[in-house]
Image (tube, rainbow, N blue to C red):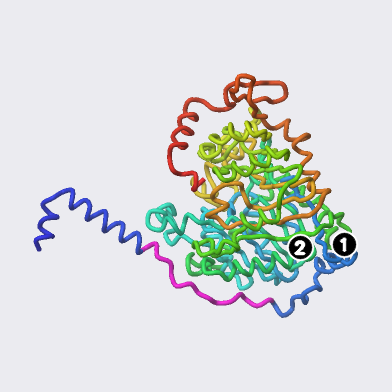
Amino acid sequence: MRVTHWIRTHPLAAGAAALATIFAGLALASRLPRRNRAGSEPIPQDAPPVGETRLAKGAQRQCADHPGLSGLHLLEDGLDAFAARLLLIRQAERTLDLQYYIWHGDRTGTLLLEELHKAAERGVRIRLLLDDNGIAGLDRALGALDGHPRIEVRLFNPFRIRWPKAIGYLTDFPRLNRRMHNKSLTADCAATIVGGRNVGDEYYSAHDGALFADLDVLAIGPVVDEVTEDFERYWTCAAAFPAAQILHQIGRPQRRKLEKRASVVERDPSARAYVERVETLPLVDQLGDGTLPLHWAEVDMISDDPAKAWGGAKREGLLAGQLAKAIGEPQQQLGIISGYFVPGQQGVTEICELARQGVTVCILTNGYSASDVPLVHAGYAPWRRQLLEAGVHLWEIARRSEGHPSRKERRRGVRLGIGSNLAGSGTGRAAAYRGGASTLHAKTFTVDRDRLFIGSFNFDQRSIDLNTEMGFMIRSPELAAKVADSFEGTIPGHAWRVRLAADGAMEWEREGEVCAEEPGMGWRAHLLVAIGQRLPIAWLL
């Protein structure tokens, strides 16, 4: 009674008690249910046997002449990358396994969801594993798809409070700060697409004038088995919750709505480029026929142990260590292409040591004005001088100044689809910003023009310590040289070369133009970066 009376007569104490009650309520509402350990739906009995689908037979014909090697086809163009995914879904006869960090409810996201629905209707078993941080506005659509007898949706590291999701960070930040950044699509256990692209218009060159440079690879052969096994590892891990335990289940009417909306999107003039590319790209037909031109190479799939999502992965289960081992000691050349480059002191020390040993080190990342997460610049900018003084070649993507779509046009892609217009994780402002900018999103490493990594791993602290990642380590001089040559060919036309002037000051040069001040940074940007550099947030970037 005395405590109650004291609280009632002291306003600050009463306010603290109210906040504590609210926080306790939010913590209770954020608690995850006991995870349902039910297995996957069985593959339909009338589905073709393993190895008997058109995709599998085509892959077998081509692999027969290249024992032990995997066949690779680079997907550099955004429209091709979208069409390849959609056509692969259309060709599937038995199974489809998809794993993504972000899935927007815009034009491309809507079209791909409806294509999955159509595949399920014809009897394909579909498993869709999505990180719950990147599906804003899709709860109803995913709940409806999960209700289909041939579609299973699981959410990785889910938020219990569905809106606004950010509330979850207040009560469960250590868990929710760890995300699944992996990206893969595998059809009939015969062909897979792995790389840096999520699902959303900006990842597939949706907007005229945008350069959202990214890279995926379509693969057949032994590495597909590795991707399939890794998907199973994530699908069954403790962080992957059946959507039915998190989302409201919505039935057939919502699936009809998805079908109708996809039809509207497909007819819209702004989606014409996608539709035409799907109609004209022969890639998947050639894959099924066994006639697709491929690069053949030894390929290893490397990935994080999914236990990283709750801080339970052992050091040998982390991708960063596996990647360092696979890269080895560069002797002549190291090329790093990373949209987010936050190396930290250890990374900078190792890179500078290589440069001093005579290894040509080239790094391409986003300039401030081109980044979709400007605060990341605060984790990158302090290391530039040290890198340049060691002889590292440093390039920063430049933002284009012309041809940007209006805000109305940027948001039109979301309104056409089934997602939300709200600015949230995976949609909204960040996506719109990317849609109007020249933004680098690829994550690629080349070593001695002999080895090449393509995947989801950024050279930043989140990829190293927090998010789960995956990718291919490819031993192919032909492909490695192709990407390495971009530093001399394609990149100079789209990026500023950062260098030290005669007086020791940094300057930016591009096609004969030299700037003493960092391009695209006004006083507000300088203030933001200066504040960010003084905050202990590098581990979050």
Q: Which residue is mark 1?
A: 290
Q: Amino acid at mark 1?
A: Gly
Residue 44 vs 251, above or below: the answer is below
Residue 485 within the magenta-colored segment of the rendering: no
Mark 1 surroundings: few (<14), some (14-19) or many (≥20) residues within 10 A:
some
Name which residue lies at 37% across and 57% down.
171
Residue 335, placed above or below residue 102 = above
Q: Residue at x 64, y 34 (%)?
A: 390
Asked if 285 appears above or below 236 in the picture, the reply is above
How would you rate the neighbour count of disc 2 (Cα within 10 Å): few for under 14, some for 14-19, many for 20 or more?
A: many
Judge by depth and name the residue closer to the eye, 409 or 457. 457
Image quadrant containing the N terminus: bottom left
The first of marks 1 and 2 along the sequence is 2
In magenta, the rendered stretch is 29-43
* The magenta stretch spans residue 32: yes
Question: Which amino acid lies under the numbered mark 2 shown in the image of this protein?
Answer: Ala
Q: Which residue is mark 2?
A: 191
Question: Residue at 64% of width from left, 31% of height from top?
Answer: 398
Provide residue 82's location: percent of width, then percent of height. 71, 51
